[in-house]
Image (cartoon, grey):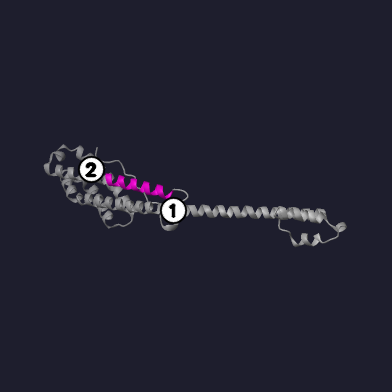
Amino acid sequence: MDQIRLLRDATRKDILISPYVLSVMTLPSQQFPKNSIRVHLSIERSALNYARIIELLVAAVFLFLFFSAMSFVFLRPALQEGRANVQREWNEFLQEVRERNDMLPGLLETVKMFQPFFAKNAVKMLEAKAVIKRSRDPEVIMASVDQLDVDIKTLEALVHSNPDMRQHPGFLRQWDLFLKKHNKVGLTRTRYNSSVQTYNDLIEVFPQSIFTSMFGYVRAAAYPPPPSIAE
C-alpha cells in the first residue's frame, strides 16, 4: 500500500519516476525503503523545478532579444536618416570653411600693407588653410580650423585697434565679406554638432543599442565651436 500511495502522489505531482524508484516499488512491503523513496522523489522534484526555471529564463532571454531586434528594425530608418544628416552637415561645414579660407590670401596681403609685423601670423594662417584643403582626416582638419579661428580672432583685435585699416575702403569691403563668411562657418558648425547629438542619442536608445554597433552605426564625433570672432 505504501508503494501504491507514493507512486500515486508522484504521478499526481507530475514527477518523473527514476528507474531506482520503480525498482524498489516491486520489493515486498517489509523490505520497502520508505525514507529512501521519499528522498529520491524530493531530489527529482527539485531537479524538475530547476529545469523549469532554466526554461523560463531561456524563454525570457529569447523574448528580450526578439523584441530588441524588432525595435532596432523599426529604428533603423531613423538611424540611416540621422547618419545621412550628419554627413550632409559635415560636407556643408567643410564647404563653408574652404570658401572662407579662399578669401584669406587677398585679405592678409592688405593687412600686411598696414601691419608688416603680421607677416608671421599670415604664414601660419596660410599653412592651416593648406592643411584643411588637402587633409581627409576630420581630427586634423578640425585642429587646423580651431587654430585658424584663434588667428582670426587675433586679426580681429588688430583691425579694431587700427583706425587707418578700418577706414580703408578696399580693406573694409574685404573684411566685411570675410566676417560674414566666417560667421556662416560658425553656424554650419553648430548645425553639424546638433545633427551629431541627435544621431548619437538614437544610437544609445536601449535595448536597440545592442544591435546598432553590430550593423555599423557608431557614434559620430562632435566638435564644439570656439567663441565667434564677430560680436
- Residue 26 higher or lower than 223, as above or below: below
- Where is residue 89 shown, x and y percent of the image? 30, 50
Q: Is residue 42 magenta?
A: no
Image-based side of 45 in relation to 84, left or right: right
Q: Nearer the viewer, residue 16 or 174?
A: 16
Name the residue beneath numbered marker 2. Answer: 155
Q: Specify start and end residues of the magenta stretch as a single range.
A: 186-204
Which residue is located at x 53 percent, y 53 percent?
63
Q: Nearer the viewer, residue 95 or 84?
A: 84
- Where is residue 62 shown, x and y percent of the image? 54, 55
Q: Nearer the viewer, residue 227 or 124?
A: 227
Image-based side of 148 in relation to 169, left or right: right
Name the secondary structure under disc 1.
helix
- Which quarter of the rendering shows the C terminus? top left
Find residue 72 and name its label: 1
Which residue is located at x 20 percent, y 49 percent?
104
